[in-house]
Amino acid sequence: MLLKAVTAFSLAAVGGIASMDYAVVDVQEGGPKGTHIVVPVPVLLAEAALSFVPVHARRVELDKAAEQWLPVVRKLAAELRAIPDAELVRVQAEGSDVRIAKVRDHLEVRVHDGGDDISVNLPLEALDEVLASLEGGRVDLRRIVGSLHRAHGQLVDVRSGGDHISVRMF
Amino acid sequence: MKRKMLAGLGFGVLVAASAASAQGVKPWLHVQVDQGSKSKVSVNLPLSLVEIALAAAPQTLFSDGHFKLHCGDSRLSVADMRKLWKEVKATGDSQFVSVEEEDETVSVARKGELVLIRVAKPSNKQSVKVDVPVSLVDAMLAGEGDEIDVRTAFAELAKRRGDIVHVTDANSQVHVWIDERN
């Protein structure tokens, strides 16, 4: 009986952990002795940890000027979700290339500048969540972390001077 | 049987037409700036997106209801522009402005539903082509007093398909147009 209960609890725990959303932060320093750090962060745990942070500390007042742009940004985000896939902006100059595109439910930003490469995939659903969290002129860090539940795959990939940083959602 | 086939065909056409209208009626604004090997800029945005951004910033475009023309210190009020436009519009298809200098020709003419502005400077391989729909100017100047109705003008612009601005010189090209392609 006890064995069954322990097995059931273990399976439930493993299943719970397996079904969690993870943000994996991978930092690889350049050079032969460069440090390589991989930090898997369960989003649920990060949210839970932020719950213990006093409300006033995890809520940041939004700048008044920024606040008045919120309705516009909300409308823009909604419109972005509605439009078909397209390359919205492309700027190519000597040694640099910037591209912003809407691809399925993501906003893709690609920047190549000299030896640096930045790739950001912004899930529009997560953006909605972030914008919703800005109600009342305050940024709630817990809700911003929570918006990561809506993200999947590569979020950020930065390569610069031999260093490599990536944030991926699982 | 024939009736069923016709009904099916009609339904198919209806579905296809509604799908096409749902996907294709959205006008897109395209801006391309090509400076050869120096730089290339391409912007493709649905007008709906531009409209939202524009609606948020009318104050930066206009001040005190006056449209600022960058001609030294002179300022042309919207009321003045309205009077001028009324006269110009009444003349129908014609050439309003024609300047021919040694190395530059400028012409402003109305042709049908468009006001065509053309500037050419052969020595610099420079040419400017601007096509402004008459209805767009009407919409801009439809308000009263010194106000330009940006919203109505924008709605009118959304009906336009084709070239709006084409500027070419020895080293660069600027092309602005509206179509239904993303």
Image (cartoon, helix red, strand yellow):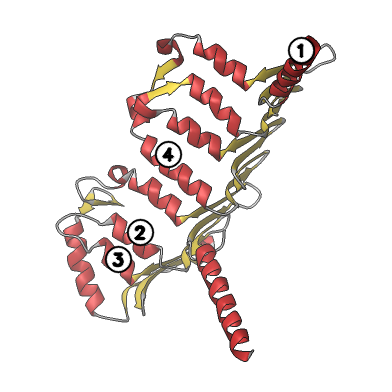
Identity of the amino acid at label 4? Val
Residue named by callout 2: B154
- How far apart are labels 1 and 4 at the CA level? 50 Å
Identity of the amino acid at label 3? Val
Residue A73: mark:
4
Q: Residue at x 51, y 64 (%)?
A: B22
Identity of the amino acid at label 1? Val
Task: Give the chain of mark 2.
Answer: B
Identity of the amino acid at label 2? Phe
Q: Residue at x 23, y 45 (%)?
A: B63
Residue named by callout 3: B137
Residue named by callout 1: A6
Residue A59: mark:
none
Q: Earlier in the sequence, mark 3 or mark 2?
A: 3
Q: Earlier in the sequence, mark 1 or mark 4?
A: 1
- How far apart are labels 4 and 2 at the CA level? 20 Å
- Between B103 and A120, which is closer to the camera in this rendering? A120
In front: mark 3 or mark 1?
A: 1
Query: Quick check: marks 4 and 2 in contact, CB under 8 Å?
Result: no
- Between B49 and A41, which is closer to the camera in this rendering? A41
Q: Residue B114 in the image: x percent, y percent?
A: 37, 73
Q: Residue furthest bottom?
A: B2
Q: Report which quarter residue A69 is drawn in.
A: top left
Whether labels 3 and 2 share one chain: yes
Locate residue A151 relative to residue B51 in the image: left or right.
right
Q: Residue B107 in the image: x percent, y percent?
A: 37, 71
